[in-house]
Structures are given as C-alpha cells and as structure tokens.
Amino acid sequence: MAYALQQLINGISLGMIYGLIAVGYTMVYGIIGMINFAHGDIFMIGAFVSLITVLLLQAGGLMAGPAAILLVLLVSMAITALYGWSVERVAYRPLRGSFRLAPLISAIGISIVLQNYVQVSQGARPKPMETLIPGGIEVMRDGAFVVQFSYSQMLIIALTLGVLAVFTVLVTRTPLGRAMRACEQDRKMASLLGIDTDRTISLTFVIGAALAAVAGTMYLLRYGVIDFYIGFLAGVKAFTAAVLGGIGSLPGAVLGGLLIGLIETFWSAYFSVQYKDVAAFSILAITLIFLPTGLLGRQEVEKV
Amino acid sequence: MAPDSGRPAPGGVILEVDGLTMRFGGLTAVSHVSFTAARGEITAVIGPNGAGKTTLFNCITGFYRPSSGAIRLHRPGGPPAELHGLPGYRIARAGVARTFQNIRLFPGMTALENLLVAQHNKLMAATGFGIGAVLGLSRYPRAEREAIGLARHWLSATNLLDRADDPAGALPYGAQRRLEIARAMCTEPALLCLDEPAAGLNPRESEELARLLLDIRGQGTSLLLIEHDMGVVMTISDRVVVLDHGKLIADGAPAAIRADQKVIAAYLGEGEEDEDLEVEA
Amino acid sequence: MSPAAAIRDAAIAAAVAFGLFAMLVGLRTEIGPQSNLILRQRWAAVAILCAIVFLGRLLITWWLGRRALRPTTAAGPWTARLQQAGRLFAPAMLALALLLPVLPGVGRYELDVGILVLTYVMLGWGLNIVVGLAGLLDLGYVAFYAIGAYSYAIFAQYFGLSFWICLPIAGILAAFWGVLLGFPVLRLRGDYLAIVTLAFGEIIRVVLLNWTELTGGPNGISGIPRPTFFGLPFNASGDPDSFAGFFGLEPSPSHRVIFLYYLIFALALLTNWVTLRLRRQPLGRAWEALREDEIACRALGINITTTKLTAFALGAMFGGFAGAFFATRQAFISPESFTFIESAIILAIVVLGGLGSQVGVAVAALVMIGGFEVFRGLDEWRMLVFGGAMVVIMVLRPRGLVGTRTPSIALGKRRAISGDLVGEGHG
C-alpha cells in the first residue's frame, strides 16, 4: 500500500513532465497537422539552458531561494522559445502547404541537428548536477518503508498545474487563443478573415517550446543528470502520450502524459524496469486498436 | 413484392429496399423507406436538400450500415445478395458500382490506370494473386489485354479515348465526371449508382451525360441515380422515387411524379427546386 | 531589398543567432577538478557563428535574391535532364555498380562503402513499397531489418543452417511479423499509424536488448557464420574445399568482400525487379490507388486490408533479407544497430529520392550514405551535417529528387505525371 502510494507520487510527477511536452506536440499537430519530431530535442535544449543558468548563478553566488529557481525557469523558457521559433522559421515555414512527409523529414533532420549540436558544443558525457531542492515530507510510514513526497516533486506538480492553468486561459480566453483555434479549424479561412496565420503558427511553436523548457527544468531538478540524448526518449514518450490522449486535444495530452507516467512507474515497480517502454507502447497500441483516435480525440467522420 | 410499383418491370426487380432506417445518434436521416428498382431501368431518387438521398445511397453502396431494414440485390438464377450485411468492398463485388458527388478519382494515375484498377479483382484472379504474375506465369497477359479492351470500350463510350494517358487529376471537370462513370462501368456492375452525376455540368454536358446513361441502360445495366437536375431526371428516368425528410412520399413514373401534390408541396418549401420543376412541368 | 534593409535584416538574424548560441556554445559545461560541473567560456566560437549567420543571411537576400531558396516541386533543369537521360542514366548506374569491383583504384574500402550504399538502396526500395507505393507511413521499418538479422544469426548459430537456407527464413519471418503488426493497426490512419509503427520498432529493440538468453542482450551475437560460395567457404587455406582452392585462385581476403558486394547487389536488384514488376500488375496498381483514394478503392471492390497487408509484408520481407545480409557481413550484431535513427534515415532516403521512384531512391541512398562515409573524418560533426543536409534538401525540394510519377501502362506514350497530382496517402 505504502509502496503503491510512493509509485503513485512518482508516476504523477513523471507524467506531468510528459504531459507538458505532449502539449507542445499536440498544439503543433492541431494547428499545422505535422508531427514536430524535434520537439523532444527542444525539451533537451530547455534542460541544458537551465543547467547552464544554474551554473552561472552558482558561480555568481546567487543560486538560492525560490527566486533563483524562477529566474532559471524564465531564462530557460525565453531561450528555448527562441529555439522553437527559429526551428519553425528555418525548417518548417518554407514547407507550409507542401506535401505531408516533407516537414516530417525536415523535423527528423532538425532533431538530428539539435542532438549533435549539443553533443558537439556541450560534450557527449552526462552532466550530473548537485541536488538543488533536497528533502521532502514524509507522507506515510509502513515498517521500514517511508513514503516520501519530495519538494522537487511538489514543485513539479504545482508548477505544471500552474503553467497549464495559465496556458488554458491563454488558449480559451485571449485573442491569440482564438486565432490559434481558428487556424486549427481552417487555416485558409482564418487568413481570409484577417488572422496573420504565420504569426499565429510561430507563436504556437514559441509557446510549445516554452512549455517544453518548463518540462526540461523540472526534469533537471528532479533527476539531476542530463545528456544530449534525453530528448529522444522523452520526445517519443510524450508523443505517445499525445496520441494516447487523442492528438490535437489539449486535455488529452495531459491525460495521456499522466497515464504514460503512471504505467511506466508502476510497471517498473511491480514487473520489470527493462520492459517499461514496451508496456507503455503496448498500451498505446491496444488503446488505438479500440479507440483509433485516442482517448479524447475527435472521431473522424468519413465523408463520402 | 414491391408495395406500389405501378407496372410490372420487364426484367423483374434488381434492387429491393425494405423498411430501411438510418439513424445518426438522435437524428433519423432515413425512416422506413421501401421501394424497388426494376432490372434494365433507370430509377431516380429525388428530393429537397436534406431529404436523406445521400444517406440512402450510402446505405445501398455499403458506406453506412443501416440501423434497420434490408437491402437486397436480386440476381438471376441465384438467391438475392443481402447488401445490408456486407462490408463495403463485397457490395462492389456483388455487382453494385457507384460514383461520388465530389468526384473521387485516383488523380495521380492516368485515365487508363483508373479503369484498370476498377478491374482489380478480375485481374488479380488471373495473376494467381500476385505470385504467378511476378514470375511471369499464368494467364495474365491475356487477361490484361482483355481488361485494356474493356477500358478502351468505356473510354470511347465516354469520349475520353484521346485522354487515356493523361493523369485523371488534370482532366477538366466534365471529363472527370465521365471518367468516374467509365471507371464504375469497368467493374461490370449489375446496378450502377450515380450520386448527382450532373452536378456542375453545363447544359451541353448534361445532355451528353443523359445520352451516356441511356446508352448504359441499353447495354443491360440498371441504374439508380440521385439527381438535382430535373431536366436530366425527367427525360431519362423510367421511374422516380421522391424522399422528403427521410420518408418516401411518392414513387412512380416521371409524369405521375410531376403531377403529385405531395411532391410539389415538398419542393415548394424550397425556393430553387420548385422553379426547376415548373420549368419542366 | 535595399542594401540598408538587407544589412538590418542580417543584423537581426545575427542577433537571433547570438541568443541561440550565447549559452549553449559560449558556455561549455565540463566536469571540474572536484568532479562538479564548471563552465568554460568560448566567446570566439559564438562570434564566429554569429558572423557566419550574418554573412550567410546577407548573401541569401542580397546575392541570390529571395526567390532562390523557395521550395519547388516543379522539375528543375537537372531533374528534367535526369528524366530525359533516364533511359541512359539508370543503366549507366547499373553498369557502374556491376563493374565497381574490377574498376582500377577500387580497393577494400571503396567496396565496403559500396556494400553499405547498396544495403541502404535495398532498404530504401523495400520501404518504398510501403511508403511510396501504398502510402502507409512506417516509422519502424528497422524492426524488420532487425528481425531479419537476428533470425539469420540465431538460425545459423543454434541450428547451423547455411546462409542460403536462412535467407528465405529471415525474409519469411520478417514478413510474418509485418503481417502480425499490420493486422491490428492498418485501420489506423496517418500519424496514428506512424506512432504505432515507431512503437513497434522500439518494442522489438527493447526485447532484443533484454532477452539475453536468446539474443545476448546488449552484447549482441558475435561469430555469426560468414556466407559461403554455395558451400565453398572463403578462407586462406587454399584447400580444394575452399573458394580459392576450388577455382584454382590465389587465396585473397578480397574474394569475400567481392562476393558480399555481388550478393547485396543481387538482393537489391531482386527487390527492384519485384517492385517494378508488381507496379505493372494489378496488385501494384491497387497499392497506388490506395495511396490516392482509399474510399474509391472500397467502392471498386478492392479489399483494403489484404492489399495493405501485402504491401506491409513484402516491404518487411525485403527488410528481412537485408537484415540477414547485414548479419552475415558484420558477423556481429547488437541492438545498437537497430535504433530509430536507422528507420529515420531509410525513410529520409525514400522521401528525399522521391516517393515511389526507384532511381530517385538509389540516388538518394548514394548521396546520403556515400556522402556520410566520405565525411568520416569529421566524426561527431558529420551527423550534424547529415541532419542539416536533410533539412536543406527538403526545404529546396519537398517532393524529393524525382518528384514525378511514371504511369504503369499507356495506350500511347508514357508521360511523367507531375508530383502535385500524385497523392501521398493518409495511412
């Protein structure tokens, strides 16, 4: 019981990270219908920018208190958003309206570029960072087993919920959100109605990258070790989460992220660590067989 | 068998729709519709917008599974095929071919290729399901020659022989419509179903279409068509079925339909259609 | 654009570049003396990068004009020439490939590169059946390559079967897995199919990695039997039972390389021959029709499931053949050779070559894999260049090198069909 509770806490905090990345996938998919394969690597960039900012602040003796963490988060969001924007501008915008596989290949190319760019500029070795937020509260004690709800996990959950709340308001209540939804429905019509679709799409990438940066910072704080390759697996998992939830659906992305996080954690805890990815992917495949458009995806009506 | 068919059809019944109902969630698009189409005739289904024509059509051609009711295709010398229980591609194999309201050709393939794809099942059987063909064995070359012959026949019948090697997507609109009919005919159907074949055609093209459809009937295929163009419907149809709000409101010869008060009332509800009717009347 | 505006534009680009590079290039994280992380500053590199971006942007806007970097699907001057010379070009490439081992100046290294390129040509042609003809997006093609390789390795190791018996077994097993995967997922559309195939590829890799008793786990399988020349082994003994001895040749290690070269050449040609042949058959036409419009196919009585499955199975089978070849050539395989990036590279070859075009795929494999080998000295930089090249080629030619489709049959003369008309599938 205590063990299960601990797994639940771990699973939810991991799921939140997946969910944040998945939102970026699903947003881009919703608006331009492409799989942004480089999104996982954008997350990795976010983690690296956070790490470098932390080291800078430590060198200046300023790395203390919540304000410093907030600063790290903001710097990471800003720089990562710039990466998101540049990638869209250079590799995807010229292919707008072109045929479907071209942006996909372009995105895979960008993913390779970003990974190797970081490998070249930062080195291939994993970067261990000392724990910034140690400790936690003891939730329950069952014999020798202590259920620990660490402060970093609390931060992840609180911050994710906060960011998602702001994001939801942004998408549902603001003119930008309206423009995004309009582009999602019918890009040509939206541009005829005077919406600057290029700008809207750029902003979608910027927001998606900023969310990935939050996820990257959280990942760094929680796990403490990053390398240039973390983006691939996290990206694939987050993409799986987005599809599981129903790609294009924002609540679906968060739900999918949570599910993938929980499945992975519980599978590792009770069955085998090696096969946790197999479990996550198998559940995705089984779900899609019965619900071909994911859990919360809109059912496509075949028009004849 | 048919509840109110005015006169006995020369070749008997080909299609029997019996108590067909189609619901989408709470909406009933087609409700208890029964009629028959006679072999060797052109049967038209008309009705105002939203009357349920296309839904009916999609049920017959297997794109929707009806909520209740039966659709039977009668075949000479065999039991009728129960279309309502068959998967889509089986319906086509049973002898029902169709065209689409918004043309669905294979745009990147040539007109000739489009017609050969239509003969896929026959050709596949001749290749020994692919294996013999790769090895160059089997009766395939002859089967292909025959298939090209049939394609040629329908290309010339639809006046497209000189465009045979052009990609279907590059043909003008009217030619695409004709090519779609030719493609459907290459499946050698017993019943050809046409979804608004005259939509978007100019008067001259409509006239050509009417001649083509009569020609197809002349070669022994029965036709079922949905049409808005009253000119076409009234001149070529042997029998007209009228739907309104998902219900069958009239069924008879064109002349009788023209005089039917219920039909006129149904169309008067809609501005455009009743003008067409008056012009013809 | 006026010079002032161009310079301002380039300055903005340089400022963006500074934002991008300042942290990740300017500050390098390194493990310090107390095994903690420290930062090393490299501002010169940042300055150089910003200068490159500034000048590059200036050149593009000023010198070439903006139109030069527009994507186009129209046939460029050289594609048109390529098509005109198509009748000559393909046979010329074929002749070159055939004669490569006997050409002067071609040594062991060149042959090894040739073998590698031909392996990817074969994989590209195999995947082309699935993606290019049937329009099904498969991101896990490497799984079939892996299944083929491991089938060969395991059957040869545990049962001592010869390469020529294992080859068909590898192909059949891969095809079997193709059907097994295809059956439940083929009703998924587009990107859902993409992620499931990707997941399948990862599942196969993870299983290979962890099923240690059978696959050796991360250590892989080594000592896989080398192929024999129909029973005659390649060795230096000079015995009458060895290849060299039997034919009365001087024993030489290059015999095996040349044999391997011709083996993969023959396998690739087999793939090509079957594909070209099927394209002119009803099955191949049905694949293409499926790519163009699935609903219309259904209305014509084509069984969509079996048609898709045949494409999947056939593509998988050729992947399996290539895998068996890979295993026998390397004599060692491990899950590391079958990562997602392999699938991505094969898919990139198909798309860069031009979907459905056999010549295009061959050229793309030659350029990508051959080019990649040429830059071997650049180490970690070459993956960077590789990814960048993928982006640049796609941006300039989204439809690939050969963007047109040749009809499979014609009453008169066959004319190429513009890529704009050709569908790309939704599956």
Image: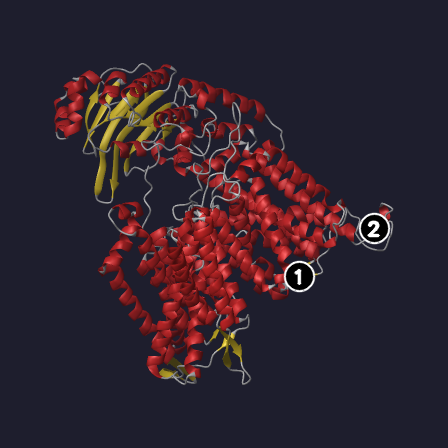
Chain containing the residue with disc 1:
C
Rendered residue at 43%/36% (across/down) = C421
Check disc 1 and report its element: helix, strand or loop.
strand
Q: Is residue C177 above or below residue A168?
A: above
In the displayed structure, B75 sits above or below B26; it is: above
Regarding residue C196, the answer to whether it shows in the image is no
- Residue B76 shows up from this direction: yes
From the viewer's perspective, is residue C15 above or below residue C182? below
Does label 1 lie on the same chain as label 2? yes
Q: Residue A116 at what x, y percent from top left?
A: 53, 64
Say which quadrant the C terminus of chain B sits in: top left
Q: Amino acid at mark 1?
A: Ile
Q: Identify the secondary structure beneath mark 2.
A: loop
Q: Is residue A99 left or right of residue C115?
A: left
Disc 2 designates what residue? C242
Instruction: Residue A43: give x, y in percent of width and height.
Output: 42, 66
Chain under disc 2: C
Question: What residue is disc 1 on?
Answer: C221
